[in-house]
Image: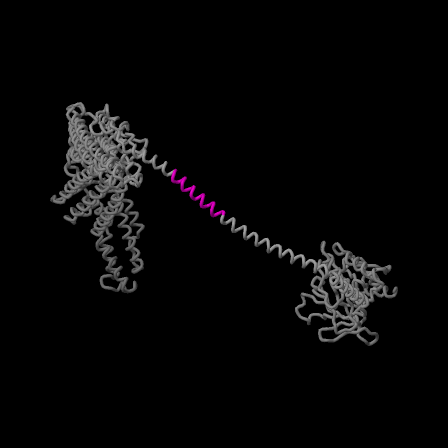
Amino acid sequence: MAKSSADDEELKRACETAIEGTKQKVVLSMRVAKSHGIWGKSAKLGRGGMAKPRVLAISTKAKGQKIKVFLRVLKYSSGGVLEHANLYKLKHLAKVELVTNDPSGCTFMLGFDNIRSQTVAPPQWTMRNLNDRNRLLLYILNICKDAMGRIPKVIGIDVVEMALWAKENTTTVTKQQIDLQVGPVAVAVTGEMKVTVERELVSQVEEDDMEDLLGGYVTGVTEAEAFSERLKRELQALEAANVHAILESEPLIDEVLQGLEVASSCTDDMAEWLGIFNVKLRHMREDIESIEHRNNKLETQSVNNKKLIEELDKLLEHLRVPTEYSACITGGSFDEVRIHQTLEACEWLCSALRGFEVPNHSTYAKMRSVKEKRAELEKLKSTFVRRASDYLINYLASLVDLMINDKNFNSQRGQLKKPDHADLRYRCKTYVRLLQQMKSLDKNCLGSLRKAYCLSVNLLLRKEAREYANELRANTKASKTPAVWLEGSTGSAQNNNASDSSTVSDAYSKMLTIFVPLLVDECSFFANFMCFDVPTLVPSGGAAPGSDGKDDDLGIMDIDGNNSSAVTNPVELQALNEALQELLDGIQEDFLSVVDWAYKIDPLRCISMHGITERYISEQKADVAGCVRTLLDDLESRITLQFSKFVDEACHQIERNERNVKQMGVLSYITRFATLATRMEQYIQGQSRDLVDQAYMKFVTIMFVTLEKIAAQDPKYADILLLENYAAFQNSLYDLANVVPTLAKFYHQASENYELACSRHISMIIYYQFERLFQFARRIEDLMYTITPEEIPFQMGLSKVELRKVVKSSLSGVDKSITAMYKKLQKNLTTDVLLPSLWDKCKKEFLDKYESFAQLVGKIYPTENIPSATEMRDLLKSM
């Protein structure tokens, strides 16, 4: 054994020498009896001329906290020195399989999961004996479990046998011992390769159970077959004992079966008796139910009789008409003193009629007494409605006649008085409840009353509006403004601008301020007073525009206590609109007369009146104010019509300039338009901007068209007339164009037309002085489209000699020609204001044309010398 340990130690040192430089430590080395190669060859142990054996070694390498384990294959070289042959990583070891072809059991195969082909390394090894095989495989299994946390699959090897072998070989420990610490498990390998396994393949509990079982028999561990036979014999003896015990218990089973038969017979007898009792109980239950049913019918009949008597008493009470109510309905007074008794009788009549409606008395509807009583109530209803209608028609007409005839209610000469209907509405509110009761009795009974009220109040409103308008015109002092704005002398335009006609628009505004709220309040009061089911004009908690709100909210509620305007009835709304048309019929004539009066004084005041009217239209949104809105729409249409009439007349004034014999300088309507536009801008209020913009568009369009026609009458001076008038238009409207977008558009149009007229006029002057020079250049430009530049000097009239003649005739004394251009430009202008700018444009235009001519000459006639563009520019600067 000492010799074997020394050999193993020497082999281990030889392996460490062979892998020196890899920083790996050899923990186990072992010779192999035979290794099976990839070509089917084998290497056997032998001496002398036989092949050298191979060696398997397990080495480790520490890398941080991890330890890598390798299986190395070493072979002897021709010099007898171990050298590295192959290397396997044990972390890739997947299975350990025993080769069954070898009867000795020493041949096994190591399967690695990273070897894709068997041609990479020999997979089979044959150890020298079973001890070597067990030592190597047990070491590999333990180190795989402890270092990598898993055990490779073991095939064909008895694991229990290996565990027993390991236990038997743990007692011998030699002096030379190798300790390997891998993770939490330590594996000790001795010189004799006795392996101590701290984590066995069989648990301690299983091992104790096996020892207890084996301790009860005088049998060795190697006598497994004898132990198995003994266990079989004991099992057969136990089964025979069980059968014997079952046979001995047969008499007891017979007694139990007899007891069950007796119990079954008793159960059948009991079921028969229970059936008999069930039939008797069913008959008793039916008798009890019959008795209860008769008792219930008697109780129901008694209750119904009692209810019938009570209902008949109620019906008799309901059919009775109180004497005081009947007298009040048929002959009671409607005066303010006794109106409360009349309303109380009317309310009783309404409730009595509602009580005879079919849903309430569908059972009694066919009874003769009920029919007679209902006919009596209908007769009372018609009598009351007729009497109340006649009284209210006469009463309301008398109130209105009193106001019409009383001069204190109307405006008088020298005294402008605001109409006041507070007293009329106060007296009417006394009968609001009566009207509601009348409508609940007969929905169609208010038609004649509404019509009579509209006719009476219409007379009152028309008289008030007529007298107020007359007195308003009489008290308004304003000088009449002539309607001629764009024709005549400048002084008349200045006088027009100086006149003040603001009192006219103020009078119109005052008329609307007084009467529009009055009419809106009157419409709202009429809708509420006459019980129309439409929304009120004034929202909850508000008042009509311009009114004080004291008399608008009548607090009118319907019979059920709900607001009468909560739901809109289309039929009622149509009836209301028709009634309001009768109420306000003809009143628009007085408003239109004020508009026509204001137009005659100052037509431009239509602008401010249009804005005032638009503001009032935007405030009238409720359905009940529809007729007032219609009145305002009529006023707006009349104002627009009158203003359009003024615009058309002004356009005719502009067009009359076309018939003049000859027009020179700035036309009169060009400068007057700025004054007119300034005045129009001062009158703009609210939404009258569109009206003014449309007038601007019509004015300026006619102005420009007329200007072009006048200019076309004299083509010689057409451009001068155009540029002077367009310049005057821009100068006069510069400030307004910055704030009025419509005028800004025409300002830019005038600017474009001015530039075109300037360009034509300047070109004419330049060509007049330098006609031959620029005609020569134009002929060259025309020929360049058809022939090459080199051929142009050989064309007729374009030779160098001709060029010299043209240059000499045009540019000799060029300063005089330029002076002549300036004088001609100055001669045709009626004012010197435009001369500096026109002369600058003329010099720039001439210089651009001359530069183009100089470039053509340099390209076509490179050898010819003409004055350069720089010289010409310096000459123009000096002049």
* Quadrant of the drawing holding the N terminus: bottom right
Q: Does the magenta stretch include residue 285?
A: yes
Task: Choose between 612 and 418: the one closer to the eye.
Answer: 418
Q: In this view, does 420 lie to the left or right of 141?
A: left
Residue at far bottom of view: 49
Magenta-highlighted residues:
284-302
Residue 29 coordinates in the image, percent (x, y): 79, 64
Q: Is the magenta stretch mostly helix, strand or loop?
A: helix
Residue 135 coordinates in the image, percent (x, y): 79, 64
Residue 643 coordinates in the image, percent (x, y): 18, 39
Task: Choose between 78 and 595: the one closer to the eye.
Answer: 595
Q: Where 161 sits versus 510, above or below?
A: below
Residue 142, picture quadrant: bottom right
* Quadrant of the drawing holding the C terminus: top left
Residue 410 coordinates in the image, percent (x, y): 17, 25
Q: Does the magenta stretch include residue 250?
A: no
Residue 24, picture quadrant: bottom right
Q: Where 270 sits versus 508, above or below?
A: below
Residue in the picture at 24% in, 58% down: 776
How many discs mark residues in the rendered view?
Answer: 0
| Residue 48 visible in the displayed image | yes
Residue in the picture at 69% in, 66% down: 112
| Residue 500 visible in the displayed image | no
Q: In this view, does 198 lie to the left or right of 568?
A: right
Residue at far right of view: 2
